[in-house]
Image (cartoon, rainbow, N blue to C red):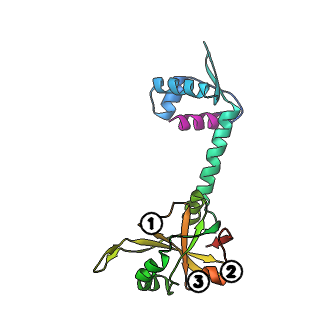
Amino acid sequence: MKRGLLLYIAEKTGLFSELQTSTTRIAEALSVSQQSVSRLLIDLEKGGMIERKVSSGGLAIALKKKGRDQLQNEFTVLKRLFHPERKLKGKVVDGFGEGKYYIEKYKLKIKEAMGFTPFPGTLNIKTDRIKVKSFLMDVDPIKINGFATSDRSFGSIELYRVNVGGVAGAIIKPERTRHDDNVIEVIADVHLRKKMGLKENNVVELKK
């Protein structure tokens, strides 16, 4: 709610002018109680976000630099989320040595879904998790349902088509993974590390 009030003030002031209003008017605009508005305004003032002047004529509110900076930071994040990245960069990192085993288990299903037989292994790339979400936001995943063998079960996976150094491949997102959410796994029909001469900490770029 505090963010909503700050945004309301920014919209009414154009960031730099002063808003002449009342807590009743703000409460009606935001569909909250007058008491809530009063409390939130006090919190924003104490936090250095706004300047507030109360007089017999009403209430005057202006954004301070800290408040504008807060909105700017949030705008940057939202812009990045709603305007998806066209490219994604990251550093090559070592995995847990399990890629070969799991890709072999999913191989036939991946070939059927993607049209290529994956090399038995993954290229692990460490990058920014927010940028990953932005990069994949407008890409429809291809889902492979989980299945079971005689000795164990395997979770579902999602595949996102990408291009790595001119090679068509896919980001693979397993339902079950030991990797942190800032590490993605990429598959292709070739050994990507060998083909591209990659070593740990080398920077690679993915494209859609």
Horizontal and vertical percent position of residue 73? 65, 45
According to the picture, the residue beneath numbered tag 2 turns out to be: 197
Q: Which residues are magenta?
A: 1-12
Say whether marks 2 and 3 touch (CB < 8 Å): no
Disc ID at residue 207: none
**Residue 77 image position (x, y, % from top left):** 61, 51
Viewer-proximal residue among 96 and 111? 96
Which residue occupies the foreground of this view, 19 or 102?
A: 102
Q: Pointer 1: what residue?
A: 177
Mark with earlier residue (2, 3): 3
**Which residue: 65% across, 50% down?**
76
In the image, is residue 135 above or below residue 115? above
* Structural distance between the alpha carbons of marks 3 and 1: 21 Å
Residue type at tag 2: Gly
Q: Quadrant of the C terminus?
A: bottom right
Residue 18, above or below 126: above
Q: Residue flagged by tag 3: what amino acid is it?
A: His
Q: Name the main secondary structure of what is drawn in magenta.
A: helix
Looking at the image, which is closer to me, 81 or 162? Answer: 162
Q: Residue 193 location, x and y as percent?
A: 62, 79
Residue under the point 58% across and 28% down: 44
Corner quadrant of residue 204 = bottom right
Q: In the image, what residue occupies the spot 55% across and 38% down? A: 3
Q: Earlier in the sequence, mark 3 or mark 1?
A: 1
Q: Which residue in the rendered view is the most extreme toward the front? A: 97
Indicate which disc residue 191 carries.
Answer: 3
